[in-house]
Image: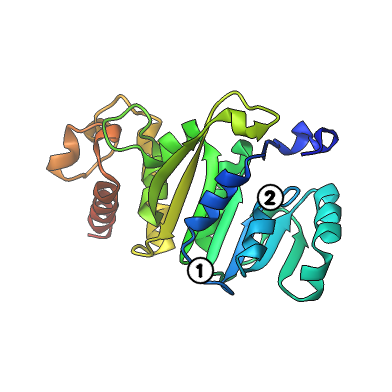
């Protein structure tokens, strides 16, 4: 890693351990020639292994310096049509279909990236995120990390925390450890319903210590004395549906 390329503007930390990168890619569990979208490749530690494994790769990179490096480093693969580099912010990417998605993503836009993935069709995503963010994504009811983002994420994806990665594996060294996650789209609920669920979550989690019956009207009796952190994601789908039916009646 060239230390002169680091800038705080992009919230950048870079994986420097090739064995960790190889492990991440193994989690894709996809055959060669699969189409992979890589988010924020940096200097290409994941990109090189993806190409070596026979994948066709699309990299989305917003930093022009790394675009230049990747274009020079992988010029043959670009000419062969095995690598496509898109200079853009991933959050502005149009809807698309890939076999797999992978990336070591910066903390300050982790939430945005997680929900942007819902625009894509894919079999599996493998992401490296900061440990505290991972804990919020996978948190269960009645735990300190359980929050609105936990519910929104779990209604959209099957999420597994696979391995903790020490902060020593990155440059510059971050203050916290990271975690490798896998995600698979659930596609059980429509976005309209999920948007309405989030409207409810926004209200109740701004009153997290209050019982739901004191915050929402016309809710089922079984939820009346419960607090926001006690309901499962599926409970919130049921609650939203019940409130809509009550309103329509």
The mark tally for this picture is: 2
| Disc 1 packing (10 Å; few <14; some 14–19; many ≥20) | some
- Which image quarter: residue 226? top left
Which residue is painted at 84% across and 51% down in the image? 64
Which residue is painted at 86% across and 59% down in the image? 72
Picture coordinates of residue 238 (x, y %)?
24, 53
Q: Is residue 60 visible?
A: yes
Q: Which residue is mark 2?
A: 45
| Disc 2 packing (10 Å; few <14; some 14–19; many ≥20) | some
Labels 1 and 2: the sequence-earlier one: 2
Indicate the secondary structure of the residue bearing disc 2: helix
Indicate the secondary structure of the residue bearing disc 1: loop
Mark 1 or 2: the one toward you: 2
In the depicted view, which residue is nearer to us: 166 or 147?
Answer: 166
Q: Is residue 120 visible?
A: no
In the depicted view, which residue is nearer to us: 23 or 140?
Answer: 23
Q: Residue furthest left?
A: 221
Picture coordinates of residue 49 (x, y %)?
64, 57
Looking at the rendered image, the quarter that the C terminus falls into is: bottom left
Q: Which residue is mark 1?
A: 121
Cα distance in 3D space between marks 1 and 2: 25 Å
- Which image quarter: residue 13? top right
In the depicted view, which residue is nearer to us: 239 or 25?
Answer: 25
């Amino acid at each position: 890693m060239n230390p002169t390329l680091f800038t705080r503007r992009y919230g950048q930390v870079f994986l420097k351990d090739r064995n960790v990168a190889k492990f991440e890619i193994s989690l894709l569990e996809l055959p060669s020639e699969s189409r992979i979208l890589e988010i924020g490749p940096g200097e290409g530690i994941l990109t090189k292994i993806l190409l070596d494994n026979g994948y066709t790769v699309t990299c989305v990179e917003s930093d022009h310096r790394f675009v230049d490096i990747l274009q020079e480093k992988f010029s043959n693969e670009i000419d062969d049509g095995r690598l496509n580099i898109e200079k853009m912010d991933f959050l502005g990417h149009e809807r698309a279909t890939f076999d797999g998605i992978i990336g070591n993503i910066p903390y300050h836009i982790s939430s945005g990236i997680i929900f942007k993935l819902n625009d894509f069709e894919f079999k599996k995503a493998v992401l490296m995120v900061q440990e505290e963010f991972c804990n919020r994504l996978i948190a269960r009811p009645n735990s300190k990390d359980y929050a609105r983002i936990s519910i929104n994420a779990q209604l959209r994806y099957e999420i597994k925390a696979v391995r903790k990665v020490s902060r020593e594996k990155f440059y510059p060294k971050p203050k916290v450890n990271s975690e490798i996650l896998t995600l698979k789209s659930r596609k059980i609920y429509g976005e309209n319903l999920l948007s309405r669920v989030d409207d409810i979550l926004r209200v109740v989690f701004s009153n997290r210590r209050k019982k739901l019956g004191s915050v929402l009207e016309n809710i089922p009796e079984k939820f009346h004395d419960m607090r926001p952190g006690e309901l499962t994601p599926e409970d919130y789908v049921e609650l939203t549906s019940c409130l809509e039916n009550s309103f329509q009646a």
